[in-house]
Amino acid sequence: MRTEQSKTIYLKDYQVPDYLIDETHLTFELFEDHSLVHAQLVMRRNPAAGAGLPKLVLDGQQLELLELKLDDRELGEGDYTLTDSHLTLQPTQERFVVDSSVRIHPESNTALEGLYKSGTMFCTQCEAEGFRKITFYLDRPDVMSKFTTTVSAEKHAYPVLLSNGNPIASGSEEGGRHWATWEDPFKKPAYLFALVAGDLWCVEDSFTTMSSREVALRIYVEPENIDKVQHAMDSLKRSMKWDEEVYGREYDLDIFMIVAVNDFNMGAMENKGLNIFNSSCVLAKAETATDAAHQRVEAVVAHEYFHNWSGNRVTCRDWFQLSLKEGFTVFRDSEFSADTHSRTVKRIEDVAYLRTHQFAEDAGPMAHPVRPDAYMEISNFYTLTIYEKGAEVLRMIHTLLGPELFRKGSDLYFERHDGQAVTCDDFVKAMEDASGIDLTQFKRWYTQAGTPRLEVSEAYDEAAQTYSLTFRQSCPATPGQSEKLPFVIPVALGLLDAQGFELPLRLQGESAAQGTSRVLSVTEAEQTFTFVGVVEKPLPSLLRGFSAPVKLHFPYSRDQLMFLMQHDSDGFNRWEAGQQLSVQVLQELIGQHQRGEALVLDQRLVTALRTLLEDESLDQAMVAEMLSLPGEAYLTEISEVADVEAIHAAREFARKALADALFAPLWARYQANREVSKATPYVAEAAHFARRSLQNIALSYLMLSEKPEVLAACVDQFDNADNMTERLAALAVLVNSPFQEEQGKALAMFADFFKDNPLVMDQWFSVQAGCPLPGGLERVHALMQHEAFTLKNPNKVRALIGAFANQNLINFHRADGAGYRFLADQVITLNALNPQIASRLLAPLTRWRKYGSARQALMKAELERILASGELSSDVYEVVSKSLA
Ligand code: PHE
Ligand code: ZN
């Protein structure tokens, strides 16, 4: 629990390690009631650290030290000091070998960090600082070592023994045990170490690399899941090919393995040659996983694979540099998905996610820069800011340099730093050196937290035929940063004439127009750009493709937004215009609700959506995205003070009004698509995702009509669909409907059919947790008693409690505070079981500043109660104390 770790650690205190570990030889003996770990560390003084022989301070937590040797000399009590986090000893030579033996208890490790048991298998999770729970070590990413690992276990229960690199020897022992030795030829930090032992089956395939090397691919799962691996395998092969084509990166070992485990704190982990995945990010087949799940599997497989270069071959110097690998790798995986499916749809999904969740983080008490400069518990910094905003920063570099120079920069980065542990500055330097572009000011994106606001105003001079856009940027204060300097904001834009055609873009001082869509760099607090030769007053299409993670404000009228929805050549901005129109309409409804007036929907939204629905030439995925109103969480984020009831009432009213007004076209599109779905086998590709997403969003509107023919269609879809995408969508709308009987039947049937599939049961929990009808908290309470639920499995916690607190806002934010009390209770229980999950679950309570004073008081009281609840983990302590500060 909270010992010395609750100290704040600062980037400015970084020092190179005093010692290095050239070789690491590990032996694991796994038993049911304990495990033994022997580590032999071949060490030397770090020449970069200066002269003399300072004390060697090894990290180690929850380790029972059995034996310690320095160069074969057994050390006694007086030769070292041991605290609950460090082992200190005095080397006597420049080069030496430390041998230690420790006893650990994976069988009772519920934190899922270090070596633990998930079901019947042993597995490890070492990022960020889990390796110190396995053995005494220099557990920091700038200490890179060559690892050899021997694992021994009972043969019958653990026939498969895996670690990083290549298998080099194996054998049997007396007493029914066996062992295997693995050797990883690449130096790596301890956080990339992995070990797995279990009764696993695998699907095997192979990939021939660009230099014609044959790589064996293996995905290991528990036997009952062997039929759900093909999609991940196909995704892996596509990722390997894409990284060769787009980044020139080739895989470097003879074998690449993925293991699926059920109990995992995060999505997946990029351990060298042995990726360990949350089973939810590997297993997918039509009958049990939705389209969204298929796409997530593909993206996570790609993400972890891409880490082999962006993370493993070139790693982070320290954890402040986390976004060096995560932001870059998220950018890489999102481009892979964009190239594989629909670029525009992928961008819409990513931006909607960023604006709802990362913007909220940036505006909350845990706001931090993409490269933080202080933390208490690094596990708390695996955030949307590090990942998603970090990816946006990479995307902006890509936009500013263009694809060719960006590729030159990434080539230089990988070549220059291969085998090193480096910083975000090193990355930017490689981009600058390769492109000749100065990114000094741009680097503020790494050091300043908060979401910039970009206000734009226009001026048209008819006589001079000039059109000026004035940009004013500002950035709100964030914890520890009151003043912000101007960012470099790339603004992609175009100008539309009255027919919707794009005008040529020629800035004052330029001799000719440069295309009809271009990127302006806004670098000043206030800056004006003037276009010349503009023959009529244009309508600007700003921030195309969401070219920077900012809050853009331009005083568009609703008619102008409708015009952009139809005519903008940028697909993302067509969607964005629709979102802005919806936001305006919803905010008007929110105001009406707050004033106690009758709600009246602006008919222009109906007209705009009708036009889309009736145009069968449009991409169905785009139509589906446009039909999705901004969510309650996003409406909360953009409110000054979020009025929970008004937001919910306004959005529900709009949905019902749209459903009534658009019943005929929705019904036509639904029926047509459902017919195709019935006649088509499941395919996990863009056109099929598109058809099903339009079908399902249409169904969710149609059910609001409560018409018997719609109910019948919904029940039919639930009963007869051959895939989870259609079945789960039907279940969700039934759960949210007033049709008690059909709903009860469907839920029972579903649970009965899928009771042995934990991932499907997660979906079953989530649809109920998200149901906005009254009584949500009571339903969640009851579901926690269900035999498929357990607080020990992070997926279950997320599916039920997480979904409730994050997606069911009207129930979670009950005026009496019962939702807050419930969440705090769960956090207190989880704090002792799994601190990382406890601390993540807390996030909704930390947003108390968004609400009115009554809710603020209730939320703060729960945070205080957590703080006073006893011995807190550093994870929970950091988040609670910072949210109350
Ligand atoms: N490094 C992992 C990824 O993003 C995430 C992770 C972090 C997993 C910490 C486990 C623990 O790919
Ligand atoms: Zn990652």
Image (cartoon, grey):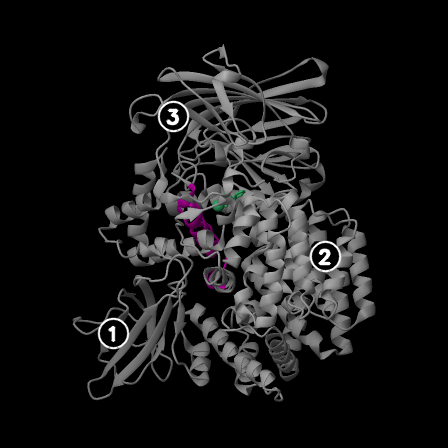
Position of 605 relative to 858 (above/below)? below
Position of 578 relative to 391 (above/below)? below
Q: Amino acid at mark 3?
A: Tyr
In the displayed structure image, the side of residue 390 where residue 259 appears, left or right: right
Q: Amino acid at mark 2?
A: Trp
- Mark 2 or 1, closer to the camera: 1
- Looking at this view, is 43 or 233 the one in front? 43
Residue found at x 76% / y 56%: 783
Closer to the chain start, of discs 3 and 2, is 3
- The answer to whether the beta carbon of the residue marked 2 is less than 8 Å from any atom of ligand 1 is no
- Looking at this view, is 90 or 450 the one in front? 90
- Mark 3 or 2, closer to the camera: 3
- Looking at this view, is 42 or 304 the one in front? 42
Q: Give the alpha-carbon distance from disc 3 to disc 1, as whole Å.
A: 54 Å
Closer to the chain start, of discs 3 and 1, is 3
Residue 339 is drawn in which quadrant?
A: bottom left
Q: Give the alpha-carbon distance from disc 2 to disc 1, as whole Å.
A: 53 Å
Residue found at x 62% / y 20%: 179
Q: Is residue 693 magenta?
A: no
Label 2 sits on residue? 764
Label 1 sits on residue? 528
SS at circle 2: helix
In the displayed structure image, the side of residue 411 where residue 748 appears, left or right: right
SS at circle 3: strand
Position of 296 relative to 211 (above/below)? below
Q: Is residue 323 magenta?
A: yes
Task: Give the magenta range.
Answer: 319-348
Label 3 sits on residue? 19
Q: Residues within 10 Å of mark 3 (few under 14, many from 20)?
A: many
